[in-house]
Image: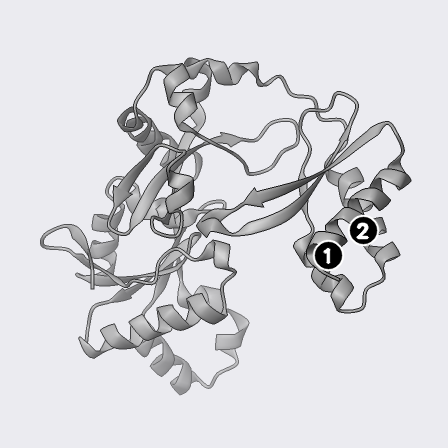
Amino acid sequence: MEISTFKVKVQKAVSEVLGQEYTVELREVQKNNGVLLQGLMIRKGQDNVTPTIYLNSFWEAYEGGVTFADIIKKIISIYKEDGIGRKIDVSFFQDFEKVKEKLCFRLVNREKNREQLEKVPYIPILDLAICFYYAFDEAGVDNGMIPIYRSHLDNWKVTDRDLLEIAVKNTPRLFPGETIPMEDVLGDTLQELPEEVRREFLRKVSMMILTNSRKTYGACSILYPGMLEQLAERIGGDYYMIPSSVHEFLLVPREREQDREELKKMIAEVNRTELPPEEVLSDHLYLYCSREREVRIV
């Protein structure tokens, strides 16, 4: 069954189960990097906040043998757990003074989001773009993000540079940067290795992860004031920056030039085979040069 047919059947079935009190709508959602997902929105009465339940994974499960009845039960269960009874007064979004304390930024790929960037304010940086959002965490919504569009700037009478100045202060305050040594990530797996093998591994893989406190769109932590300089002091000089996803960077000391090509191959392989398309940040390897205090594409 094609997903276009599947989503219509799901909409009809969910609507029949819930009854006339509920509105069940289909919505195509453009995610990061131009990825299009098929969403289902369920609303009761005057509720004005409801989660979008993405149907792509349910369609794959159905094609893999899960019964249609079980899929409908699961969708309704998700809605009842996450989406009932949320009424939020969104009029505050008209007042910039009420919005600016939670304006933040994130990093996305500029070329892969070219169409979407025509609609939003952004600041270009290397092959990436700094985009803006309002960090929404009210009415039981966790890690909510309301994108900022050009129309918002027109209403607020502010510029993209105004947003950047504010977001540079807010984002580190709300979502502080975090560095995690690779050995902490590997944990018990590393401890199972013989002592000599473990020491040799840690010597060769001198790597750390840079993200933020909520582990979501944490790659933007490289833009926090003083962050790159502080990392250079910890690492002891220049270092490579591997864009492992929109959520994090991997940092590796610049020791041997031959490492550069190996790291480039690793980025291309991971982006192609391991990451969901919407989580890819860049296909490039970056180098932070501590003397010049700048980042370069290499």
Q: Nearer the viewer, residue 135 or 211?
A: 135
Q: Are marks 1 and 2 in contact (CB under 8 Å)?
A: yes
Side (left or right) of 82 relative to 92? right
- Residue 295: give x, y in percent of width and height: 20, 53
Side (left or right) of 61 relative to 94? right
- Residue 143: give x, y in percent of width and height: 55, 38
Residue type indicated by callout 2: Lys
Q: Nearer the viewer, residue 10 or 70?
A: 10
Q: Quadrant of residue 289?
A: bottom left
Residue at label 1? 58
Residue at label 2? 74
Q: Secondary structure at mark 2?
A: helix
Q: Which residue does the image show at 29% across and 77% down from the upper left?
A: 262
**Quarter of the rendering occupied by the N terminus:** bottom right
Q: Which residue does the image show at 36% across and 68% down from the upper left?
A: 267
Crowd tier of the residue under label 2, counting other residues whose Cα lies within 10 Å: few below 14, some 14–19, many 20 or above: few
- Residue 71: give x, y in percent of width and height: 81, 55
Residue 291 vertical placement versus 272 (above, below): above
